[in-house]
Every structure is written in C-alpha cells, then in structure tokens.
Image (spheres, helix red, strand yellow):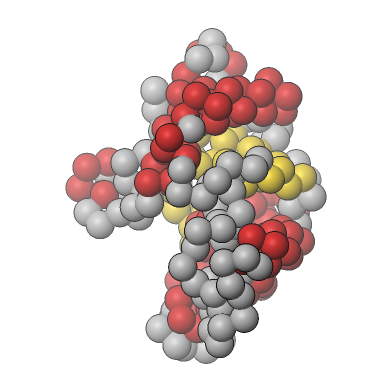
C-alpha cells in the first residue's frame, strides 16, 4: 500500500480516463490521494453538446465538474492551483516551485503525472516536465516513484510498452461517473464510439489503466 499518492495534471477531466479507476482502487484500500489540478481548462473549445456553456461561464462549470469527478473517485483532497490553461509551458519556474512545496508537505510515495514529450498537449508535457524536474532535486533516497501517462501516437516505439497495467474492472462504475461528470467536454458515448456503457468491449476498455515508470 502506498503511503500517499500525489496526482499532478493540468486540466479538469485529465484524471477521468487516465487514472480514475486506479485512484479509486487505492482510496478503497485506505491510501490518501491528493489531486493537484493546475487549471480550470478555461480555454477548452468544447461547451457541451447540446451547447450549455460559454467562454465566460466555462471555468465555473468545469470547477463544478471537477469536484463531481473527484467525489465519484473518492478524492477528498483536491487542490486547484490557479494556473492559466494553455500557458503551463511558459510558467515552469513557478510550477516547479509549487510542485516542490507539495512534495515537501505531503511526502508522497507515488506521483502520477504525464510523460513529458509523449502526452500530445503542450500543457500535459510541460506539467510532466516540471514534476520530474522538482522530484529530481530531491535526494535519491527521498524521491517518490513516478508513474506517467502517455498516449501520443507511436510512443511505445520510443519509450517501450507500459510497465504498469492496472486491472480496475472492480472500479468501472467509479470511472464511468468520473468521466460523465465532465459533461461540458464530452460524453462517454462519444469517447467509446457511441456504444452503450454496458457493451462488453466498452467495459473491457474501461477496465484497465496503464502507466510508465519514469526512471531518472
């Protein structure tokens, strides 16, 4: 069992497909989880389908959606760090300092973030880079394990296959509720090509989550 898990991701909804089942599993076992979400995703292009948000209301809506997702997973310690969406790569010094503060406060045994260079979105890559930079400043004996999320096309050709594959079928309902909380961004049906959540292929897809251990 982990001592404490720290999740650092840039946008509301990043947790839903990537790690919600894994986090629910750890929480069920009694592991404390802190989720540091950097932004409110205020620059997101999606406004609901049918449309129910606009550029002014979107940040508030996404905050509420994030809180609902965390309740579905069981996360009680949610930190909203107040960075601006789509600017993470330009705020690395402040972000690295903030990550250092979280590491000092929480002393996690495991940190979950994006794999820099293999996570498609500049905010994803920049977040992972800052996390790894901050952890790298710690003495080797004090560094938590880092599990990274990667999904860029062809990433396995460069970084190999994921070395962590978690069976989270027992927590599929938690994951579905987490995904569905982010109504402004997508529906679960859209993400699984319109099939029912009861479809065996959908359940199979939702039932595993994969990570790469980042080795310094």
Q: Nearer the viewer, residue 2 or 73?
A: 73
In the rendered image, which quarter contains the N terminus? Answer: top right
**Residue at image point 73% right, 24% down:** 105
Q: Quadrant of the C terminus?
A: top left
Report x, y in % for residue 52: 62, 81
Using the image as rendered, state which of residue 114 and residue 83 is in the foreground.
83
Q: Residue at x 54, y 14 (%)?
A: 138
Give coordinates of residue 103: x percent, y percent. 64, 25
- Please tell me in which quadrant of the rendered image residue 79 appears: top right
Q: Nearer the viewer, residue 141 or 96?
A: 96
Residue occupying image coordinates x 45% and y 49%: 86
| Above or below for 144 versus 212 | above
Residue 159's place in the image compared with 197, above or below, is above
Q: Where 144 sits versus 86, above or below?
A: above
Q: Quadrant of residue 82?
A: top right
Instruction: Let me know if residue 199 appears in the view.
Output: no
- Confirm whether residue 194 shows in the render: yes
Counting from the top left corner in percent of width and height, residue 201 is at 44, 81
Residue 84 spot, x, y in % from top left = 55, 46
């Amino acid at each position: 069992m982990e001592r404490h898990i720290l999740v650092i991701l840039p946008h509301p909804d990043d947790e839903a497909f990537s790690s919600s089942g894994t986090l629910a599993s750890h929480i069920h076992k009694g592991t404390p989880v802190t989720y540091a979400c950097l932004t409110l995703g205020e620059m997101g292009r999606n406004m609901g389908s049918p449309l129910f948000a606009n550029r002014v209301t979107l940040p508030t809506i996404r905050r509420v959606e994030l809180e609902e997702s965390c309740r579905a997973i069981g996360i009680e310690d949610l930190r909203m760090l107040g960075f601006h969406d789509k600017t993470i790569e330009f705020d690395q010094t402040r972000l690295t300092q903030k990550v250092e503060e979280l590491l000092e406060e929480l002393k996690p045994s495991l940190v979950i973030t994006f794999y820099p260079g293999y996570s498609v979105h500049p905010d994803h890559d920049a977040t992972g880079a800052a996390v790894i930079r901050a952890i790298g400043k710690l003495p080797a004996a004090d560094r938590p394990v880092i599990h990274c999320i990667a999904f860029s096309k062809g990433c396995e050709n460069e970084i190999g296959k994921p070395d962590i594959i978690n069976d989270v079928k027992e927590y599929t309902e938690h994951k579905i509720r987490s995904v569905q909380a982010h109504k402004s961004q997508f529906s679960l049906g859209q993400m699984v090509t319109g099939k029912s959540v009861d479809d065996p292929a959908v359940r199979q897809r939702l039932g595993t989550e994969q990570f790469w251990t980042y080795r310094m």
